[in-house]
Image: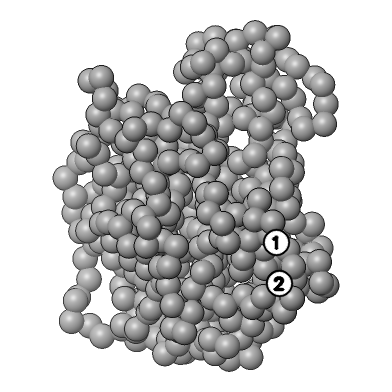
Amino acid sequence: MKLSKLTYISVAILTFASCTKTEFDPYEAPDSGSADFSNYISIGSSFTQGFQDGGLHNEFQQQENSYPAIIAAQMGVSFKQPLVTGAGSGYMHLAFLNEKIEVIKAYDCQENDNHPLAIPYDPSFLTWTNQTTTYNNLAIGGLNVRNVISFNSTDAITNYILFGGSTPSGQLAWNCVAGEPISPYGRFLNFGSISNPVDYIEHVKNSKATFFTCWLGIHDVMGWANAGGDDVSGSSILTPVASFRTKYDALLDTLKLTASGGVCATVHDITEAPFFNTVTLEVLGKDIWIKEGADTNIIRKAVKEDLLLLSSSSLIKEGKGLTMQDPLPHQQVLDKDEVIIVKNYINAINAEIRASAQARAYAVLDMYQFMKTLNSGNEFNFDGINFTTEFIKGGFYSVDGIHPNSRGYAMIANEYMEVINASYGANLKPVAVSNYRGITFP
């Protein structure tokens, strides 16, 4: 998936404090307790697939160190992922230019002002997986709960166009590549054809999982929020809560056929991520004019409750938003009323996730509370490393300000394992976060 426009923001380099590693007996064999880890699968979206920096890449094992892969390693079980090569889908990165560090967005075929240092997708990304291979990580960047199963032909065709193939005319293909689906991150699964599409849930069923982790629901709200509260496409709408529950139930019922154990994670408050909290009125030190909402003609000065997206920085730099006559477009602002909509929506679907999981005796990881603690604004020490939510130098998030870096994913893996141990009597050992990479500085 590709985030909105993001150009150059000056950042300072963080020097991490000396680290102390998590202590455990390396010779103690993992015990699954009452769980059966023999066929562990992971279900989710970009956060589960191992996204960092606005893309899927693997030069320094970023994708290999997805949180489910870390969990599987501690379980001592085989875990196959559909891995990209090198630059993968292309991604954002840091460069030292004009005596300062700047963020360079990934190459975008729809832009005519790409930076010379912009990283495009690796040619191998168009053929990066083999659909005859059985994978344990079934996460797909951009996957919503509403895409898990289709209840009518419209849903089925929509899901196929999103993950299986482009529209017949090809105008919605990913990154201007003819024949590509809107989200090519599910290429490793066979979605059939537009006349005979295959649902994602069929692949979950065919996995015959004995244990699973599931972190779905993020993209059911993130697409809308990242677009400034605009339904710019079918992939960015808020999934109706009733439909969310029905399809989440269907997913867990399918898993219940073979999986005696599993953990479902709640959705964190994405509005607390750096993507929504870096470009502030306090930092800018000036008035910013915004267009409020997708369906109004209201133009007003931004207030502190409005969240200017990280991507708005480039437009502000060009003078956008500095006058009433030239306000920031509403897609670059999650206005104060939309922030409330997002927060209420997350609370609503989290209630459904908890109820659905508990009704089937599956464990629940309160990722909402974990991330709220992390995003509290206070310094957070883990394994001797001090983390904050500050953009770039905070230590947890990657360059896109939404997805964690490898250290962040290691922390998430530890949270899952703590719940697995408590719920199933297992003895999975936490990993040393300091053994994983943070952001790569130039």
**Position of 281 relative to 427 (above/below):** above
Q: In the shown orientation, is residue 265 left or right of residue 65?
A: right
Amino acid type of the residue tagged 1 in the rendering: Pro
> Decide: marks 1, 2 in contact (CB < 8 A)?
yes
Q: In the shown orientation, is residue 177 left or right of residue 92?
A: right
Q: Say which of marks 1 and 2 sits in front.
A: 1
Structural distance between the alpha carbons of marks 1 and 2: 9 Å
Of residues 313 and 133, the one nearer the viewer is: 133
Element class at badge 1: loop
**Position of 58 relative to 70 (above/below):** above
Amino acid type of the residue tagged 2 in the rendering: Ile
| Residue at point 23%, 20% (across, down) | 99
| Residue at point 43%, 67% (across, down) | 127
Q: In the shown orientation, is residue 205 left or right of residue 314?
A: right
| Residue at point 62%, 30% (across, down) | 332
Element class at badge 2: loop
Of residues 39 and 260, the one nearer the viewer is: 39
Q: Name the N-terminal-most of marks 1 and 2.
A: 1
The residue that mark 1 highlights is 168
Q: For residue 310, say whether it is visible.
A: no
Say few, some or many: other residues with alpha carbon within 10 Å of mark 1 (under 14 / 14 to 19 / 20 or more).
Answer: few
Q: In the shown orientation, is residue 184 left or right of residue 236?
A: left
| Residue at point 74%, 76% (across, down) | 195
Of residues 394 and 27, the one nearer the viewer is: 394
The residue that mark 2 highlights is 194
Residue 208, picture quadrant: bottom right
